[in-house]
Image (cartoon, grey):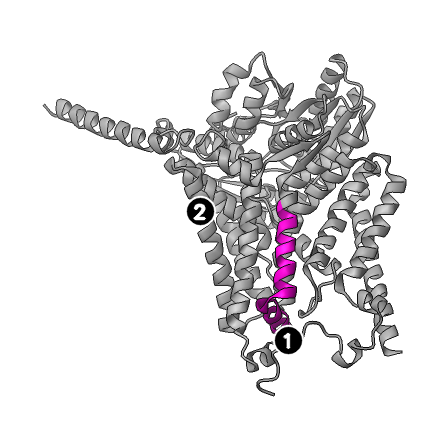
Amino acid sequence: MTPTRTRKRLTVVAGLATAAALALAACSGGGAPAAQQAAAGSGGGAGDNSGYTVAMITHETPGDTFWDKIKAGANQAAKNNGITLKYSNDPDPAKQATLIQNAVDSKVDGIATTLATPDALAGAVKSADDAGIPVVAFNSGIDQYAQVGASMYFGSDENLAGETAGKRIAEAGGKKVLCVIQAAGSVALEARCAGVKKGVAATENIQVNGADDPSVVSALQAKLAQDKSIDYIVTLGAPIALDALKAMDAASSSAKLVTFDLNVDAAQAIKDKKIEFSIDQQPYVQGYLAVQALYLNKKNGNDIGGGKPVLTGPSFVDASNIDTILPFAKNNTR
Amino acid sequence: MSQTVTTPPTAPTEASNRVTLGWSNRLLARPEVGALVAAVVIFIFFLAVAPAFRSPASFFTVLYQSSTIGIVAVAVGMLMIGGEFDLSAGVIVTTAGLVNAMFCYQLGINLIVGAALSLVFSLAIGFLNGYLVVRTGIPSFLITLGTFFVLQGANLGVTKLVTGSVSTPNINQMDGYKALDAIFASSFKIGSVTVEATVLWWFLFVALSAWILQRTRIGNWIYAVGGNADSARAVGVPVRGVKIGLFMTVSFLGWFIGMHTLYKFDTLQAGNGIGNEFLYIIAAVVGGTLLTGGFGNAIGVAIGAFIFGMTSLCIVYAGWDPNWFRAFLGVMLLLAVMVNLYVKKLSTARKVG
């Protein structure tokens, strides 16, 4: 009896939802899929209910979609293992160190942190070690994580990623590469461009203001006009790649575009063959593994990576595999 | 002291002196002349050192870059002449775009409705800024600093809440996109040169602002309010209304560039626009607007934006080391301001002598 009634009610609800969707679709197509809201709420069944509290601390500058994926991964891992995740961030190294110290003081069960500025964070990480709190590093700090005192590392090797991209460009016949740096003074971004330069010696860097799309477009347009020999552009973030497409269009440039990282629009552009390929470091995996590793370590004393960094990239996304990856990009998991 | 002041204080030049001035001095006393000289000097300099700059296409790229700064700077300049600051002008651009994109995408509503709603919302923020300033008497620097932080946080927070990400979804498949794209973000070709619509809009807004400031009663009010608000009030200028109106003008043109950014790029990153408020102020100041209010004009502000656009792109055209970009920019802007000051001093000195 009851099952039938529920089913009936469900049908009614579904019918209403469809009607609502149709009504909305009548106003304008191309908007949010009607099912989106419903799907967002449902999560996978919680596995363990460990009751651990994990602090995740990053150098995120608010407003970059890249970090959404790291957080999405971390949240999923926390959900699967019944962990309370406390996320905090500050791009300023001193403030990030304070945030780590805060986590130590509040006696969390584990700390996952990025090490974009290892020297500035070493003191805080040490005090976590002294307090017996396991620390894992992710996203940045591949060369220094061990000496700073983090036990594991999950992330990409930026230099290697750049180098692989550079080699691939050289193999495709690239002669002159423009590497677009969207934030001044970032070690990770500089390392990517330096890596590209190892593959193609004639690589030139340009600084743009990533927080202002129109100025990125006009700066790239200017550069393409100034140097006609540029045949490859490498952008270091997905939104910048889309700006570069506008600039190439306006400058009638025939250069080819390569980008680091992914978002929905960039994935679509790869599918449309406007972007040659993307070097993905899989931020979702970084966030997920960092939290998962802390859980395993706390629960079973597991150690992942055998004392070596666990690489989440570089993973190439191009026309050959984009069809598989595009749905994941839309899902914010790739 | 009551009825005679129908002729407003146009500029802080002394009326008795003005009669005896020759045309050259009168020219030099204009706020935009210093900026114009600086612009010409920098222009010739870059023509000499940057071969890639010597083409009409490059010139129009510079104009586009200038226009995206210049449109909001027009309003910020007027506001500064009126004696106030608006530090929220950079983020309001992003707020306007976000409101439009998210409202329409999530509810599946025609984009034109969203653009109108976003306009109303932006004007309301401008009104709030202005109202708080005139009502509390707290310096606008502080009030708008507050709005700046509030909007910056709300941009990120609300976007994350609504879309689950910190950028808006792509809206180029929605109804109304074509019309709005044509208004705010279209471009057309003259020969090999791409002309962006914002350049034309910029010229229009500058002309409109110049006309209002120089030829209308409201313009006189703005100078009077910025020169000395108390005396202006004493002679019957609606000081509060003028100031609130100026704040709303800023948010209107901020909305305009917000629309441009949204329809040109189809998605918006919620953290964008921060820092641009200073570019607007810089453009106004380089263009001869006094930081203390009461002096400046629209053409000057436009030239200021042009100097900024030209310098920032010509460093690229010249192929200079990108790591030094900001340093070059700083030196160029300092030079522009100094040339500006020198020319102005020259004019004052002659007047006295």
Please tell me in which quadrant of the rendered image residue A177 appears. Answer: top right
Mark 2 surroundings within 10 Å by alpha-carbon count, few (fewer than 14), some (14 through 19), many (20 or more): few
Query: Can residue B145 be seen by looking at this rendering?
Result: yes
Query: Can residue A298 be seen by looking at this rendering?
Result: no
At label 1, which amino acid type do we have?
A: Pro
The image shows residue A328 at horizontal and vertical percentages of 48, 22
The image shows residue B57 at horizontal and vertical percentages of 75, 34
The image shows residue B150 at horizontal and vertical percentages of 51, 55
The secondary structure that most of the magenta stretch takes on is helix
Q: Tell me the residue that label 1 is attached to.
A: B8
Name the residue nearer the viewer: A180 or A249: A249
Q: Tell me the residue that label 2 is attached to.
A: B116
Name the residue nearer the viewer: A73 or B107: B107
Mark 1 surroundings within 10 Å by alpha-carbon count, few (fewer than 14), some (14 through 19), many (20 or more): some
For the point 83% across and 74% down, the residue is: B21
The subunit carrying tag 1 is B
Q: CA distance from mark 1 to mark 2?
A: 36 Å
Q: Could you say whether the residue bearing mark 1 is in a helix, strand or loop?
A: loop
* Magenta span contains residue A138: no
The subunit carrying tag 2 is B
Please tell me whether residue B294 is drawn above or below residue A272 in the rendered image.
below
Point out the stretch of residues depicted in magenta: B201-226
Name the residue nearer the viewer: A55 or B329: B329
Numbered tag placed on residue B42 in the rendering:
none
* Magenta span contains residue B212: yes
For the point 60% across and 43% down, the residue is: A61
* Quarter placement of the N terminus of chain B: bottom right
- Is residue B195 left or right of B331 when viewed as pictured? left
For the point 64% across and 44% down, the residue is: B200
The image shows residue B329 at horizontal and vertical percentages of 79, 49
Q: Could you say whether the residue bearing mark 2 is in a helix, strand or loop?
A: helix
